[in-house]
Image: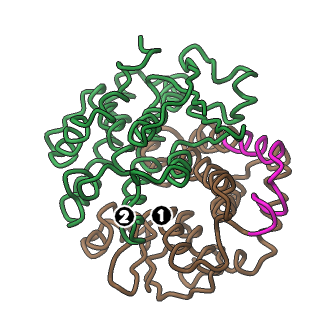
Chain colours: A brown, B green
Amino acid sequence: MKIYDYFRSSAAYRVRIALNIKGLDPARDFIHLRHGDQHQGDYLAVNPQGLVPALVDGDGETHTQSLAIIEYLDEMHPEPPLLPADPTGRSRVRSLAFSIGCDLHPLNNMRVLKHLEERFGLTSEQVANDWYLHWINIGFLALERRLVAETSTGRFCHGDRLTLADCCLVPQVFNATRYAADMSSFPVIQRIYDACMAESAVSSAQPSAQPDAE
Amino acid sequence: MKIYDYFRSSAAYRVRIALNIKGLDPARDFIHLRHGDQHQGDYLAVNPQGLVPALVDGDGETHTQSLAIIEYLDEMHPEPPLLPADPTGRSRVRSLAFSIGCDLHPLNNMRVLKHLEERFGLTSEQVANDWYLHWINIGFLALERRLVAETSTGRFCHGDRLTLADCCLVPQVFNATRYAADMSSFPVIQRIYDACMAESAVSSAQPSAQPDAE
């Protein structure tokens, strides 16, 4: 098993957390997103979408999209599970994960921020304040409300075991703090993030702990 | 079972396709997104994220996020399946679905287009040409490459049965054509879209066929 990774990619970060929780330690190839490695023919042959992460399993099949990779890992290596056993719980965990993975993270991707600056001439300050933090605040406010209101919230997003939802929450909070988001409005998100980071499987997946960190 | 729906929501459209494939016909409540129904207290009590669709199942539990809802429907009503039986196939279908649901669709959501106009003063023409179609072209180009290169592509995105990937592809193409995207560069996507639309489960889910259509 091999993973194509980049220390600062939130999507790769999610998969690193999942791999650590499962006790899996695949070979790693580093794709430097700021140097544009993802647009080179070598990597496009692996993942035509030109995004990291990608996972090549023992049978040579390539898996892409972080959320699909984590579901695949959970099916192939069921212990410990990253989704609850009951369908309603599974649906909740996926919904929390997608509220980050679909409605929040894609808007603040590097390629999107770059496009805003290059195509529309926005300053990096406008992009940070009127875009990045705008979507963080909307997304985290809705997430916070759910985590407060829903009784399945526990030490982590869903009960007291790490799930797919936590794999998504941690990188998103990590990035938000890089942009100096005010987390005081989101105490439950912050509490869960802290609880996750107290787990070595999570903390050892953080960007600064990766071999390609700068 | 009840679904909160809006005829023009791509996410609701995905779930309508899945429900039709499963032969399920839940009660429907219409949330008029352009009138702002999604921000009213009544609906926020159902879905604090203020997005459609939401599905309330017989046990009273609310399910949100279209992709989580479809996975839930597939677990509770397994026939006909919306994911292949083999883990590699499941991973591919999810990856195709997420390449639309995470990397493409969220960027072109109504609230995002509105924000570009209101906060940055972009004209609707700039938003259409330099944003909407920009991401459509990048996303569809990558998707087209995969559908061409990967041998599991069939009459539909994955073989000859409708899957979660088709539930995502159809609304995305439908919307792209509303913005007059040039589909001639994406012949496989167009072919699969046409094959999907030849299925009554798919065509009857289209916006213009809904009771709340305008």
Q: Which mark is residue B137?
A: none
Q: Which mark is residue B92?
A: 2
Residue type beneath disc 2:
Arg
Q: Give the spatial CA distance, label 1 vs label 2.
A: 8 Å
Q: Residue at x 57, y 43 (%)?
A: B65
Q: Nearer the viewer, residue A206 or B82?
A: B82
Which of the 4 image quadrants contains residue A30? bottom left
Tell me the magenta residue range: A139-161
Rendered position, B113 above or below A107: above
Q: Chain of mark 2?
A: B
Rendered position, B196 above or below A198: above
Where disc 2 sits, the SS reads: helix
Left or right of B46? Residue A107 is: left
**Residue tagged 1:** A68
Q: Position of residue B212 (x, y in %)?
A: 47, 15
Q: Residue at x 81, y 54 (%)?
A: A153
